[in-house]
């Protein structure tokens, strides 16, 4: 019998693997976005400083650069590998899809990142130690390298949502998958948001300037930059939304809560109001206010946006051919990839998953509950927790359903793929009954009892 190339499922019963990855990613996004936005600001300020002979601007750039070294290049360099590690264990086939399609693009991004690191160190430690032309070139080099990393990452993130061109499925090609209307909308939106982050974090340095006149000047420069970038980012987002395919619009209508769009308006309004206030009354800007605003941007700006973006690509995790539960859901002739749905329909997941214990490959009365727990872990836990807490607790979605009703739903909508935001989950009739029994059995959905993962990873019969 054919065995699928599946990996063990990583399941965190308290938060869920998606939230673990999301928390790390949100911290990283703030650090990385601030770095890219600040690099562009540095190029602008350094050019003005040398043209108008204003050494105080260069000192501001240097001090801001020191903050970046600690904030973006220490915290960001920790959370970056954290994303790779957590994403790899949470979605190994998704990461594999990205690497197989874009290994040289990733390598190019790492080259740009090395350029970033060299650039920030040169910018900070070679200030006033090299001639003006060399230092200005280093600042501009840092800006180009930083924005280059963003450009490459956005292309890969866009592919995770859907390939830029439909021709990618049949013809392959890096550019077919990399570039599309959504990609360019994201570039504009993220560049604007990066400038907002740079303006907010830059206030931490500006608030500590001792010269009152220069402090007021820098505070107002950052405020004006923040207002223009926030408004540009909003219009960029509106354009990006017009590039969404019909599938994503259905998911957005079904999954995003009613308060999501009003909350975007609220975040935009508060951000613009913050910058307007600091422009009108620069004296109110303090280090603590700037830090608080940076945290607010992370919590109320980055987290909802990233959560929405991740929701829109559901039920896929990469290229709209790898489901979030790691099953290959469509043919990709260009890669020689075949859909695994027919095999699952014929044999069931328990028979073809390499890490299922031998005693669970055939369902009987004695192992039915355990088989249901294993199936729920494999099929559901990349998007849901099985208990009462964490990421989209599954109990919330099946409240009021008895075993018979849930079995009818799973055997109908989910096995046939009728839900736009849920992966198609072909199962045998016995598997449908087992997972329905587990999800509706009293006590089996508690955090304490979701312990199948260790069994189904470590069992001697699993291999």
Image (tube, rainbow, N blue to C red):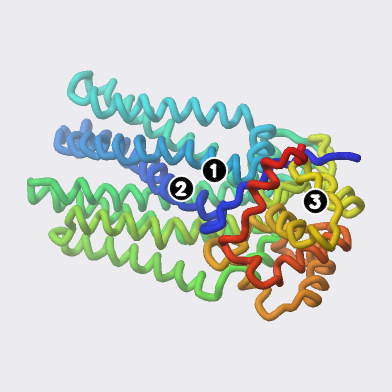
In the rendered structure, the answer to whether residue 222 lies left or right of residue 322 reads: left
Q: Residue at left 39%, top 48%?
A: 30
**Which label sits on residue 86?**
1
Q: Residue at x 24, y 55 (%)?
A: 290
- Tags 1 and 3 touching, CB below 8 Å: no
Horizontal side of 413 relative to 384 (left or right) equals: right
Q: Secondary structure at mark 3?
A: helix
Tell me: residue 263, above or below residue 450. Answer: below
Point out the tag, 2 or 3, that comes first from the N-terminus.
2
Q: Look at 19% across and 53% down and name the residue there.
A: 287
Which disc, if any, is residue 360? Answer: 3
Q: Taking the image as drawn, is residue 164 in sight?
A: no
Q: Quadrant of the C terminus?
A: top right
Q: Residue under circle 2?
A: 24
Q: CA distance from mark 1 to mark 3?
A: 28 Å
Residue 73 location in percent, x, y?
A: 36, 35
Tags 1 and 2 touching, CB below 8 Å? yes
Label 2, label 3: how far apart the Cα atoms are: 35 Å
Please tell me which residue is depicted at 38% across the width and 44% down the height of the picture: 31
**Mark 2 touches mark 3? (CB < 8 Å):** no
Residue 211 placement, left or right of 189: left
């Amino acid at each position: 019998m054919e065995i699928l190339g599946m990996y063990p499922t990583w399941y965190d019963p308290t938060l869920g693997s998606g939230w673990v990855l999301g928390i790390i990613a949100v911290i990283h996004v703030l650090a990385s976005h601030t770095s890219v936005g600040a690099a562009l600001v540095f190029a602008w300020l350094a050019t003005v400083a040398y043209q108008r002979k204003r050494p105080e601007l260069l000192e501001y750039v240097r001090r801001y650069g020191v903050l970046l070294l600690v904030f973006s290049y220490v915290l960001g360099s920790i959370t970056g590998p954290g994303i790779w590690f957590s994403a790899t264990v949470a979605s190994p086939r998704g990461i594999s899809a990205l690497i197989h399609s874009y290994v040289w693009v990733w390598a190019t991004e790492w080259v740009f990142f090395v350029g970033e690191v060299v650039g920030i160190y040169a910018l900070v430690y070679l200030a006033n130690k090299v001639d003006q032309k060399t230092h200005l070139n280093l600042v501009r080099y840092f800006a180009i390298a930083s924005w280059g990393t963003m450009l490459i990452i956005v292309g890969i993130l866009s592919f995770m949502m859907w390939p830029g061109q439909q021709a990618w499925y049949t013809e392959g090609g890096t550019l077919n998958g990399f570039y599309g209307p959504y990609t360019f909308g994201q570039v504009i939106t993220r560049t604007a948001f990066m400038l907002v982050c740079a303006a907010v974090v830059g206030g931490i340095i500006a608030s500590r300037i001792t010269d009152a006149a220069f402090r007021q000047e820098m505070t107002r420069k950052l405020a004006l930059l923040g207002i223009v970038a926030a408004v540009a980012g909003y219009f960029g987002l509106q354009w990006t939304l017009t590039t969404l395919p019909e599938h994503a619009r259905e998911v957005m209508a079904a999954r995003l809560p009613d308060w999501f769009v009003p909350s975007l308006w609220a975040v935009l309004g508060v951000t613009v109001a913050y910058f307007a206030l600091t422009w009108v009354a620069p004296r109110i800007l303090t280090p603590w206010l700037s830090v608080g605003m940076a945290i607010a941007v992370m919590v109320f700006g980055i987290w909802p946006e990233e959560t929405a973006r991740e929701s829109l690509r559901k039920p896929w995790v990469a290229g709209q051919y790898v489901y979030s539960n790691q099953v290959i859901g469509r043919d990709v002739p260009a890669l020689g990839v075949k859909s695994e749905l027919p095999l699952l329909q014929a044999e069931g997941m328990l028979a073809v998953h390499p890490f299922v214990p031998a005693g669970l490959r055939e369902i009987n009365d004695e192992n039915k509950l355990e088989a249901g727990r294993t199936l729920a872990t494999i099929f559901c836990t990349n998007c849901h927790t099985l208990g009462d807490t964490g990421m989209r607790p599954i109990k919330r979605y099946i409240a009021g359903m008895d075993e018979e009703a849930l079995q009818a739903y799973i055997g109908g909508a989910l096995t046939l793929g009728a839900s736009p935001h849920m992966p198609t989950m072909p199962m045998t009739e016995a598997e449908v009954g087992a997972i329905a029994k587990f999800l509706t059995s009293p006590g089996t959905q508690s955090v304490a009892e979701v312990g199948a993962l260790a069994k189904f990873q470590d069992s001697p019969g699993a291999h």
